Image (cartoon, helix red, strand yellow):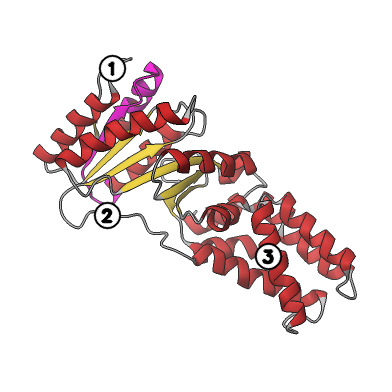
Amino acid sequence: MGFFNKLKSSLTKTRKSFTEKIEQLVIGYADINDECLDELEEILISADVGVHTTMKLMDDVRSGIKKKEINSPQDLHPFLIKHISTILSSGENSPAAALTGPTVILVIGVNGVGKTTTIGKLAKYYKNENKSVILAAADTFRAAAIDQLQIWGKRANADVIAHGEGADPAAVVFDAVKATISRQTDILIIDTAGRLHTKTNLMDELNKMYRVIKREIPAAPHETLLVLDATTGQNAIHQAELFTKAAPISGVILTKLDGTAKGGVVVGIKEALSMPVKWIGVGEGEDDLQPFNAEEFAAALFEK
């Protein structure tokens, strides 16, 4: 099964809770009235598009009615497809790459979102692109995270730089950066601790890593990616808000789209947080993580 077909399949639950309900709404009303608009607002919120994004879309709909762009309930569906597709396509979604030398990717996120597994899949993706990869096990808070990353390193045929449990994460990063430079490796992916006890602790730890990286590679890290679990819906947006206050996030990796009816959260992240979704995960397989393609996502979301 190609990735687009997997994406369509993974969005089945979201389509049922979102696009199919909009289609039913269109059939259920002869005219657009307050009741019809209230029901449309309910559908958008229940699909985890988010309150902020829902209000914006509803303002767009009311403006479309005034401008005669929407004259009947039948016009709602194509109008929403157009506006949601515009939201998804805005900004730069493509993963960043260094102009010269290695590309350094820092990966952050709370425990339980599939961060370490996602890093393993990222490594596999880049290896499939004939890139050399080093993984840095800078989540030294959990011994299991180090072990898990080493397992993924073997699967992806990527070197793993690791110290013991409780080691200084910045020291791991230092060794990983030095190894990346000396071996002329294409990609360095850094795992980090998934703790969010306080914004200050997180910021201090990340700042230390940034300083170590920039001392050796001034333009790095080229990406700071936040891993979010799509099944948590609005909680994912809340996590993103917290992390943006603690770190300069360049984009989001959204995992577990295959297990949720809350795929609308992609739209919420893009609109409410002005944050690009750069990668999406649609399954447990090693190749089920791919760069986010806004046109493909919109096509899969709205396909009947």
Q: Earlier in the sequence, mark 1 or mark 3?
A: 3
Residue 33 placement, left or right of 65: right
Residue 69 percent coordinates (x, y): 72, 82
Figure check: 118 above or below 294: above
- On-image quarter of the C terminus: bottom right
Residue 281 percent coordinates (x, y): 49, 46
Q: Is residue 268 visible?
A: yes
| Kind of element beneath mark 3 | helix
| Kind of element beneath mark 2 | loop
The boundaries of the magenta stretch are: 127-150
Task: Return the residue at label 1.
Answer: 167
Q: Which of labels 2 and 3 is toward the front? A: 3
Residue 153 placement, left or right of 2: left
Task: Return the residue at label 2.
Answer: 97
Name the mark on residue 57. 3
* Magenta stretch encompasses residue 229: no
- What amino acid type should be assigned to the residue bearing mark 2? Ala
Q: Earlier in the sequence, mark 2 or mark 1?
A: 2
The answer to whether mark 1 and mark 3 are in CB contact below 8 A is no
| Kind of element beneath mark 1 | loop
